[in-house]
Image (cartoon, rainbow, N blue to C red):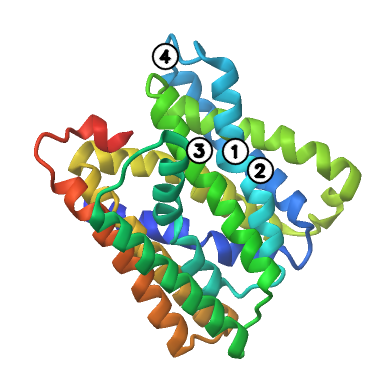
Amino acid sequence: MPIIALFVLSLLWGSTFFLTKLLLIDFHPVSIVFYRCLFGMLGLLPFFLWKKREGDFDKLPKLIMITLISAGIPWVFMSLSLKGLDTTISGVLNASGPIIGTILSVVILKRVIPKHEIWSVLIGFAGICITILAGMNGNSQFHVGSAALLLFAVCFYSMSAIFSSMYLKHCSVYTLSFITMALGTIYSGVFMLFIEPMSFRNFVDWKPFLLFIAIGMVSSGFGNMLYYYLVKSRGGLFALLVTYLMPIMTILLGVIFLGENVSIGMVVGLFFVLASVYLMNKKRLYKKGVTKDEYAS
């Protein structure tokens, strides 16, 4: 069952770029984030009411800030970036999250990173550069500004992970997931009122409903709980395998359903990025004495 859950989770999270690309045909990026968060919030509401714990809101200001930078803000940037990027390239660049997270941990936490992690960051940076060069010189849809916007969004994801481990260990995953969706709905909703206030008119048939259920309720909402199940059942090392499977799923969906191109340079860039993530986590995850709770954080 955990193996099946792992592949399902990689498909759910890897399909985000593909689903966003389909929704961009009819919706503004800000509207996509609003409905994605709204559907995700509605899907998580019963679980939040059932599983919330006393003390989840003890650090409310930090809870608001951290959950907002984990979804609402970066999802807007990510959706905007996909107007100028193929999903195949986006999947590779998005896999750089652990690399950027390591760099930010040095800046924010003043953490001294071991030599093997320095090498892993350099390898990952080389992979990002190779991917960008491959996009610039290939037949794929690619704009440097869009790539920079996506990497900027990844910085927010990474910061939220660092701050969550520092300040929100006391919160249940259900509370974190629900508040993330709720604040994302409010944040993007304010902008949507000025940018695309009549976006609801684009719901002319069942297609947008199904797409938003998939990206919001299933991928964003239930995907978080599926990850938590993997951490609890098989540990963090097993759950982190999703990092390696996600870009592969993203590329496959882009090639099969959107007819996007995959160049040799992109494959090489993906190899460098995934090798970097593997080297970065190998010693940390096999270190003796690490518990499942530490994995989860």
Q: Nearer the viewer, residue 297 or 246?
A: 297
- Disc 3 from disc 2: Cα separation: 11 Å
Q: Amino acid at mark 1?
A: Ile
- Within 10 angstroms of label 2, few (less than 14), some, or many (20 or more) residues? many
Marks 3,1: beta carbons within 8 A: yes
Seen at 16% across and 35% down, the residue is: 290
Instruction: Kindly state the secondary structure of the residue where label 2 is placed.
Output: helix
Determine which residue is flagged by label 1.
69
Which badge, 3 or 1, comes first in the chain's sequence? 1
Horizontal side of residue 287 vs 273, given as left or right = left
Question: Mark 4 or 3, which is nearer the eye?
Answer: 3
Instruction: Kindly state the secondary structure of the residue where label 4 is placed.
Output: loop
Instruction: Check the image and name the residue furthest to the left.
Output: 288
Determine which residue is flagged by label 2.
73
Instruction: Kindly state the secondary structure of the residue where label 3 is placed.
Output: helix
Seen at 47% across and 32% down, the residue is: 163
Seen at 39% across and 31% down, the residue is: 165
- Disc 2 from disc 4: Cα separation: 26 Å
Horizontal side of residue 255 vs 105, given as left or right = right
- Toward which corner of the image does residue 288 lie, by quadrant? top left
Which badge, 1 or 4, comes first in the chain's sequence? 4
Give x and y (percent) for residue 230.
27, 44
- Disc 4 from disc 3: Cα separation: 21 Å
- Within 10 angstroms of label 1, few (less than 14), some, or many (20 or more) residues? many
Seen at 30% across and 39% down, the residue is: 229
- Within 10 angstroms of label 3, few (less than 14), some, or many (20 or more) residues? many
